[in-house]
Structure formats: structure tokens, C-alpha cells
């Protein structure tokens, strides 16, 4: 065990950098690695906001009679949303007592947790778009109101989403909000077939490839059974194939069923849905990659009056969703 009572600030910084580097390898990035969102790194000195939109084109060619010019196809812009940068930070103090009473494990725990603060906050902020997806806003853990409307002004999960180039509406919330099962999976697939349009109002074929759930064990096990079983689950023998086998990639989102402060929210434990990685309009912009600033001798991070050595982490990102056509959802609570 390292003897902290004999270590200098420069040596301690080297030790801290190693601990922080190892801690970053342990970060759980469920949502960031899920494929549900499109992630973009924003270059420095390019502003603190971005506008996101999508453009649809008519799917079908028009008749061209002899001698006529080709007709210009219809192009329809979709809804737009502006992403705004939000900066996050945390700081900790490594006290004199920690260093001079050889409290090595306390130091390791503090530095490890600090390195994970910004990535963890990004994870919960992203997953809370699903947690509070039936509302248009929510209060985050800092008490700030977060606008989570889509470009049509509605909640992410809604029964009457609008499009820009037609009076047609679509729903992406499954009627009856059943728990995951064969019937509800087929209901979700039917929702994809019948309620997925482009902004012109034409039915579109969208490849939905992700089945996401909370970390509720029963929900996870049912999802895995349907995606991994070689035979129909209710079949009397193995001669009937499981039509869901390998159809979707299962993603577990352990922070969806949480309160604004990250506590357990059992009311959200049965949430699940299908998502399309190719057509996702869920955008995450990284304006500042998470980093940890180490203390330096004779700086504000090396406190003369308290003998504390301060570490600080920072990061900045934005989250925005323009429309709900890429996702289908059920709250799993059986409500109408």
C-alpha cells in the first residue's frame, strides 16, 4: 500500500492520474454505446448551440410523358430543435488527514468517483429522456427545468405526433401499455408498420433493430428469452422456430427507472420499447470531453490555509430529440 504520509504533491498528482485513468475504464456507458442516439463531437470555437432538423423526399417517381421534362420531386423539411450546451462539474478535496494518516482507500474511492461524475451525469440525463418521456419537461437533480419536447411541441412518447407536410398523425406509444410478451412485441411491430411516416405523409419502411428495457430482472429475462430462444417459447416441441430470435439487439438501460436524483422509481420499472439506430433523431453533442484537473503547487488547487489538495472535473454536452418516428414505447403498467 502506498504510504501517503511520505508523498509529495508532484508524486501524489502522478498517483492520482493513474487512479483516474483506471477509473475511466470502469465507466458504465449503457446509453452512449447503445446505438439509440447519434453522438457528435463539437469542435472548439464553433458556438454553444446547434440546430438539428431532418429533410424527407418523396419516395416515388412521377410519370414523364413523351417530350416532357422530368418533374421536380417534393422535398419536405421536418421539425427542428436547437441543442444548447450544458456544462457539468464536480470537485473534491484530498485532505491533510487523508494523506498523513495513510487513508489510501478513501483517496482511491474519491478520485475514482470523481472521474465518473460527468459521464454518469450524461448517462442519467440521456436516459431520463425516456424516464420522463410521457411529459414535456421535468426537474433535474439540480432543480432546473429541462424542456424535453420534440419539434412538434409534444412529449417523446405520444399518441398524436404531427408531421410537417401532411395532416396525418402517428402514435409511438403502444395502446394499453402492456408488459413485454409475444403479443405486445407483435403489437409494437404492427405499430411500426402502421404508424411510421415520412414528413410528406407516406408510409415508410424503417429498420428497427434495438429492443431496449429497464434493468428490471423479469423484463430483462423475458426479452432475452424471446431474442435468444431457438424455438417458440410456448411450443410443445422444438420444431417451431422462434420468429424473434436475433431480430433485435437487446439494450439494458439501468437509469431509466430512477427518480430525478437517481433513486429507484419502481413506477418506471416495466418501461420498454423498440428503436431504430439508422433513423434515430436522438442527438447528443459533446462540446467538452470529460476531464479531471489535478492540483498544482502554489495554485488555488493547493490550499495554503486548509492544506487541502483539490481535484476538479468538467464536461459539457447537449441533448435534443427532433421527432419520435425512430422509437416505439410501452410503459408496461397496463394503463390505457
Image (spheres, helix red, strand yellow):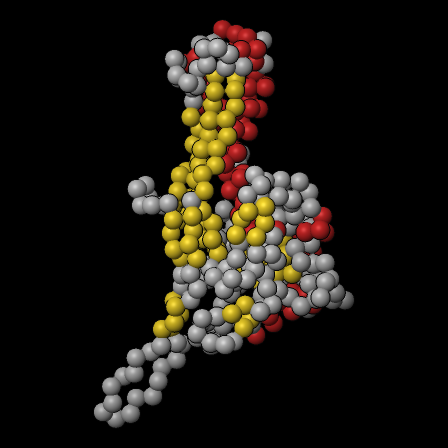
Which of the pair 226/271 is nearer the observer? 271
Left or right: 296 as drawn, with respect to 249? left
Most extreme residue toward the top is: 6
Instruction: Judge whether 10 appears above or below 273 on screen.
Output: above
Q: Residue at x 63, y 57 (%)?
A: 272
Residue 24 visible somewhere in the drawing: no
Quarter of the figure with residue 302: top left
Instruction: Judge whether 196 appears above or below 15 on screen.
Output: below
Q: Residue at x 65, y 45 (%)?
A: 258
Q: Position of residue 260 (x, y in %)?
A: 62, 43
Residue 57 visible somewhere in the drawing: yes
Q: Position of residue 106 (x, y in %)?
A: 59, 19
Q: Residue at x 52, y 76 (%)?
A: 168
Q: Position of residue 16 (x, y in %)?
A: 47, 21
Instruction: Judge whether 16 appears above or below 247 on screen.
Output: above
Most extreme residue toward the left is: 67
Amino acid at each position: 500500500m502506498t504510504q501517503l504520509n511520505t508523498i509529495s504533491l508532484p508524486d501524489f498528482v502522478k498517483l492520482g492520474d493513474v487512479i483516474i485513468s483506471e477509473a475511466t475504464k470502469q465507466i458504465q456507458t449503457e446509453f452512449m454505446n447503445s446505438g439509440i442516439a447519434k453522438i457528435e463531437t463539437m469542435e472548439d470555437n464553433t458556438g454553444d448551440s446547434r440546430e438539428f432538423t431532418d429533410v424527407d423526399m418523396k419516395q416515388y417517381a412521377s410519370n414523364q410523358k413523351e417530350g416532357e421534362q422530368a418533374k421536380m420531386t417534393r422535398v419536405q423539411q421536418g421539425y427542428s430543435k436547437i441543442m444548447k450546451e450544458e456544462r457539468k462539474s464536480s470537485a473534491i478535496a484530498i485532505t491533510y488527514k487523508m494523506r498523513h494518516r495513510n487513508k489510501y482507500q478513501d483517496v482511491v474511492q474519491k478520485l475514482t468517483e470523481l472521474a465518473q461524475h460527468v459521464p454518469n451525469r450524461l448517462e442519467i440525463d440521456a436516459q431520463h429522456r425516456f424516464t420522463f418521456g410521457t411529459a414535456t419537461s421535468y426537474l433535474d437533480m439540480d432543480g432546473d427545468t429541462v424542456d424535453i419536447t420534440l419539434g412538434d411541441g409534444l412529449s417523446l412518447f405520444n399518441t398524436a405526433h404531427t408531421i410537417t407536410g401532411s395532416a396525418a398523425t402517428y402514435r409511438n406509444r403502444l395502446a394499453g401499455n402492456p408488459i413485454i410478451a409475444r403479443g405486445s412485441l407483435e403489437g409494437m411491430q404492427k405499430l411500426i408498420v402502421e404508424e411510421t411516416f415520412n414528413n410528406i405523409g407516406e408510409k415508410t419502411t424503417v429498420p428497427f433493430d434495438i429492443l431496449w428495457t429497464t434493468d428490471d430482472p423479469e423484463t430483462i429475462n423475458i426479452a432475452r428469452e424471446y431474442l435468444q430462444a431457438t424455438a417458440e417459447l410456448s411450443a410443445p416441441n422444438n420444431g417451431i422456430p422462434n420468429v424473434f430470435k436475433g431480430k433485435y439487439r437487446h439494450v439494458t438501460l439501468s437509469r431509466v427507472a430512477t427518480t430525478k436524483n437517481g433513486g429507484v422509481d419502481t413506477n418506471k420499472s416495466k418501461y420498454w420499447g423498440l428503436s431504430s439506430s439508422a433513423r434515430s433523431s436522438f442527438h447528443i453533442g459533446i462540446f467538452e470531453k470529460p476531464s479531471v484537473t489535478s492540483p498544482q503547487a502554489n495554485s488555488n488547487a493547493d490550499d495554503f490555509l486548509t492544506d487541502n489538495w483539490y481535484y476538479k472535473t468538467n464536461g459539457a454536452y447537449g441533448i435534443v430529440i427532433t421527432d419520435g418516428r425512430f422509437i416505439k414505447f410501452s410503459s408496461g403498467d397496463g394503463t390505457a
